[in-house]
Image: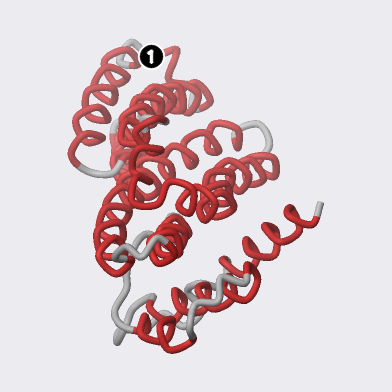
Amino acid sequence: MVDYMSKLKRFIKSLFYQANWNYENMQGTGFVYLLDEINKEKEFNVPDRIIKKELSYFNTHPFLFMFVVGVWFREFLNNGDPEQYKRIYSSAFGALGDSFFWHALRPASFVFAAIIAFYNPVIALIFYLLFFNFFHFFFLYRGFDIGFTYGKETISWFNKILFNKWSNYFDIMTSFFMGLFLIVMLHKSGFENNVNFYIICLGYFLTGTALAKKVDVVFSLMVVMIVTFVLKISVGI
């Protein structure tokens, strides 16, 4: 029970990680804050002067940084090179996190919630918050323990869960559910009684698929909605 409470406290503290985000050292202050807090909590006895040296530039994805904190402690205690793996993993997790959370998960959460919003906007909002933050909070809660356990081999844990493929999986789901969203939207607009309905659906499908691979799915959704609005007021289809 005590261990769970310490993990919960660590998780809550991680939510303040970006409180002093700045252009001088980016997330460096937050990184040192977590190092200092966990050092006291775990009694790792890392000298204060060593921790303060980490006030230099640091930037990674804010939902994956706890893995880097765990790796740093493991490598320090193993007399390794924590600074080297801090740089390596900050770059790697910055790219992986942006690809999954911003490019894939956020638009997927939006499309899922948009479909639910046709029936209940309140539930849609709650769903969006729960669905998106489930992944966000899970990685913050478990990140330190995984990073500390695996150390410099932490990337092997991400390979085990096939994390680099999650973005593709969510892109596929987003494209599919975006098509479902368009069907529901067109149905509620009365397009199903028009002969052009099927042609428009095919065009939207092709447009959405093409844009989803090159731009952002949310952007393609905006394009589709604008085109629908223009067609409706101009030719009345």
Between residue 120 and residue 47, name the one nearer to us: 47
Residue type for callout 1 = Asn
Q: Is residue 196 left or right of residue 41?
A: left
- Which residue is found at the position 54% from the left and 51% from the top? 145
Give how far across and how far down residue 156 sits, in percent: 35, 38
Give how far across and how far down residue 148 sits, in percent: 48, 54
Give how far across and how far down residue 19 sits, in percent: 51, 79
Give how far across and how far down residue 63 sits, in percent: 46, 56
- Which residue is found at the position 29% from the left and 21% from the top? 200
Q: Is residue 173 left or right of residue 19?
A: left
Between residue 202 and residue 99, name the one nearer to us: 99
The residue beneath circle 1 is 194
In the rendered view, would you say 205 is above or below 82? Answer: above
Between residue 171 and residue 197, name the one nearer to us: 171
- Badge 1 marks a residue whose secondary structure is loop
Q: Report whether residue 142 is seen.
A: yes
